[in-house]
Image: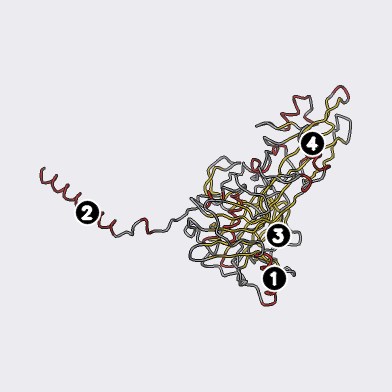
Amino acid sequence: MLKIVVAAVMAAALIFIGLSQILSLKPPTSALPTRIAIDYEPVCDETNYLEIGSSYEPIMKESKADDAIFTDQERLAFVVKNFLTVDDKETLNSILRPKGISEQEIGALSKALSPYMLPKDLAAGDYYRLELNQGDEDATIVEKLVIRKLDPNRLPVLYTVERRTKAPESPSFTLDVREASITEEQAVIRLRVFQTLYATFNTLPFGNELMQRLIAVFAWELRLPEGVLSGDEIEILVSKKYALGEFIGFGKIQSVYYRQKGRTLFASFFTSKDNTIRGFFDENGRSLEKEFAYSPVFETTATSNQKWRLHPIRNIRIKHNGIDYRGKIGTEFFSIADGTIKEIRDDDNVGNMMRIEHKYGVHSEYFHADTLEKNLRVGDRVKRGQKIGTIGRTGKMCTGPHLHMGLYRLQGEKRRFLELASLKKLLKPAPSIDKEHMTEYKAHLKTQLAHMHREPIPEQTASIREGAPVVHR
């Protein structure tokens, strides 16, 4: 017994010595550069579209002078002083029925709204205003219903339903939809990376969305998250959007510097006058994109990626085979690469859909479209960046306006879904700017760079160039 104990102690001692030797071969921690992991993952179970885009709250602390944004008439139309607020779990039916309004009346109101808004779209924080009257046989009827809510891009929208017939037994209504005006201004966002990329961009209002767009620009140039370092400097020339005096988000990135100690990345979005060239290019006109575009939608936000999740309709745990892109109904989307249309149809579950076959045996599929281009047929060739449809909410499995895009290869009759990043080494670069358009591009660059800074960026700050509002939480 004693021999066994002694042997065990000696074995433990040898293991300890061996581990110490191995650890001593590692470089000291202080010699390693600080790596920044992106702790951001687009998360959406398709039940939060309404939360993202419909509940109205004061959007930002930052605002503009009223007279620079909207007219007196527009301000009066959207003012919420005489509106009531929708409470949590309230519906159109639960609001109207206690007021003595019949189900037939509510059904007619819902039908009038249905091209643009479903009854279930009414969300906590939305505003509404009612004008009631007494009809025949003392029935309460709706003369006018006004609903104010935000679309998926946070733009205030007024839905005005007015009575067309007086008879309670055959109600009929007209619908008027009015969006608030949008104004844009150019701004330079300047950041120094600290903690994580997510934490850095979280110092900005709607910073998550701007971060997604930055990642899309350098998706093929910068390894993420390994390539992001603490202290990296980011300078972005971008438009800022305002509606009714409130900051509602960023537009497309126009130009951007990503500066590290060892290198500087630059990208500028350029569209030629003849519309034959469009995309992000470096100072020399080299494309930063690949044969496959990173996203099928401009100026949008990915809200759900490929992962296991609780399905919002089926209420079962299931793999989400694609990426969802939030956007209001009617937003254009494009083919991510050259290819041949293999399928176009209206499916009960996923609505208006299209499947396209590309190079390397890769297929892309697009679901829930509001419309698909009428001139496209099965067998037609489409080009990278060609419009193929508009975002919608069609199909039983759709809970809110968005585009679902999936990528897959066929294995027999089965689809093996994949992520675009897995094709990085396979895809060829998109064409650079040719000599014919280089003069135009150089003039574009000169204009862009005139707006951008060169001085060092302060530690852990996010600021806007002088003359524009400061953006921070």
Q: Secondary structure at mark 4?
A: strand
Look at the picture and state if 45 lies above or below 22.
above
Q: How is the image coloured?
A: secondary structure
Residue 417 picture location, percent across and down: 54, 56
User: Which is more foreground, mark 1 or mark 3?
Assistant: 1
Q: Which mark is residue 17?
A: 2
Q: Amino acid at mark 3?
A: Ile
Q: How many marks are shown on the rendered structure? A: 4
* Res. 443 mark: 1
Q: Residue 179's spot in the image, x, y percent?
A: 77, 46
The answer to whether the residue labelled 4 contacts the one labelled 1, judged by CB atoms less than 8 Å apart, is: no
Question: Of residues 258 and 423, which is closer to you in this image?
Answer: 258
For the question of whether residue 423 can be seen, the reply is: no
Left or right of 409, for residue 127: right
Can residue 129 be seen by looking at this rendering? yes
The span from disc 2 to disc 4 (Cα, nearest Å) is: 77 Å
Q: Dot 4: few (<14), some (14–19), or many (≥20) neighbours within 10 Å?
A: some
For disc 3, the marked residue is 388
Q: How far apart, in angstroms, are the residues tagged by discs 1 and 3?
A: 32 Å
Question: What is the quadrant of the C terminus in the image?
Answer: top right
| Marks 2/1: CA–CA distance | 66 Å
If you read the primary sequence from the N terminus, does the residue marked by circle 2 or circle 1 appear first? 2
